[in-house]
Structures are given as C-alpha cells and as structure tokens.
C-alpha cells in the first residue's frame, strides 16, 4: 500500500476513534465512519471489512504490550507504561474508549486481550 493509502487508513482510524469514544463500540456503523471521513462506502470497504477490524487496529496501536514483551523490557516498566496509558485514557472524558473496549470484549473478542482481569493468560 502506498503513502496515500496509509494516510487514508490513518484518517479512518483517527475519525473512528472519535466515534467509538463518543458512542461506544456497538453504536458505531460503517455509515457513521463514511460520514465522518467523507469516504464512500466502497472507499471505506477498500481498507476495512468492518468496524471490528478498525477497532482492533486502534487497540493494537494504543496497547502495544506484546511488542514490549518481545523486546524483553522489564515487567515493572511495561506495567508502569500500561497503567499510565490506561489512566490517561480514562481521564480524557471526551476521547475515552473505556465503554467501547468493554462492549468489544463482551461481544466475544476477549481473545484480543492476552491477560484476563484475574492476571491469568487468556488462552481463549
């Protein structure tokens, strides 16, 4: 994909992020994203198959713990970074994805999160 395509995908993710923060995961449709980005439905589907794919990419960008583990960073530093990111996300009332993340996980996407709330590895 060329620079223009990558820029378009970035614009889609940025605008979708705002929609997910405003409405939660369940309420956002591809039509909403088309309206927000100015893309046609065909233009949007050229890059993404649905809202789940877009949201998954947004989460992958926001929470990059797997990369930190792979780089063998210290656990304390990873935890500190994650807690800081989560705190900043929660405190930003306008752009908080907390509701959207909760809805996304409860739709059967808990496998996205490598560790469950109990601290145990989530093997699906």
Image: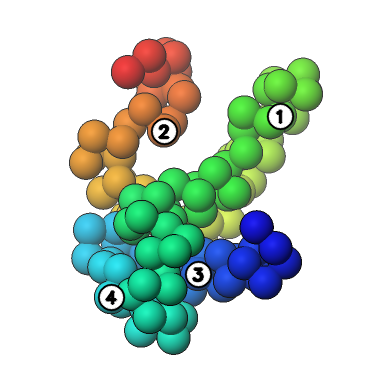
Q: Secondary structure at mark 2?
A: helix
Neighbours of disc 4 within 10 Å: few (<14), some (14-19), many (20+): some
* Label 3 element class: helix
Q: Earlier in the sequence, mark 4 or mark 2?
A: 4
Cα separation between marks 1 and 2:
16 Å
Q: Is residue 11 left or right of residue 19?
A: right
Residue receiving disc 2:
112
Residue at 21 percent of width and 41 percent of height = 107
Q: CA distance from mark 4 to mark 3?
A: 12 Å
How many C-alpha atoms fall within 10 Å of the one at disc 3: few (<14), some, or many (≥20)?
A: many
Residue at left 51%, top 53%? Answer: 58
N-terminal label among 1 and 4: 4
The residue that appears at 26% across and 68% down in the rendered structure is: 29
Q: CA distance from mark 1 to mark 3?
A: 26 Å
User: Which residue is tagged 3?
Assistant: 12
Q: Is the C-beta separation of discs 1 and 4 under 8 Å?
A: no
Work out whether residue 93 can be spotted.
no
What kind of colouring is applied to the model shown?
Answer: rainbow
Q: Nearer the viewer, mark 1 or mark 3?
A: 3
User: Residue 9 appears at what percent x and percent y?
Assistant: 56, 65
Q: Are marks 1 and 2 in contact (CB under 8 Å)?
A: no
Residue assigned mark 1: 68
Identify which residue, 69 or 46, lies in the foreground: 46
Left or right of 56, for residue 72? right
Residue 31 is marked as 4
How far apart in space, not on screen, are marks 1 and 4 (Cα)?
Answer: 35 Å
């Amino acid at each position: 994909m060329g620079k223009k395509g990558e820029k378009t995908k970035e614009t889609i993710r940025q605008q979708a992020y705002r929609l997910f923060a405003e409405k939660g995961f369940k309420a956002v449709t591809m039509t909403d994203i088309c309206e927000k980005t100015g893309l046609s439905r065909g233009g949007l589907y050229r890059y993404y198959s649905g809202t789940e794919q877009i949201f998954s990419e947004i989460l992958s960008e926001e929470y990059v713990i797997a990369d930190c583990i792979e780089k063998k960073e210290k656990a304390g530093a990873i935890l500190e970074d994650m807690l800081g990111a989560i705190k900043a996300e929660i405190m930003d009332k306008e752009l908080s994805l907390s509701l959207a993340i909760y809805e996304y996980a409860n739709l059967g996407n808990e496998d996205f999160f490598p560790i469950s709330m109990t601290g145990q590895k989530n093997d699906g």
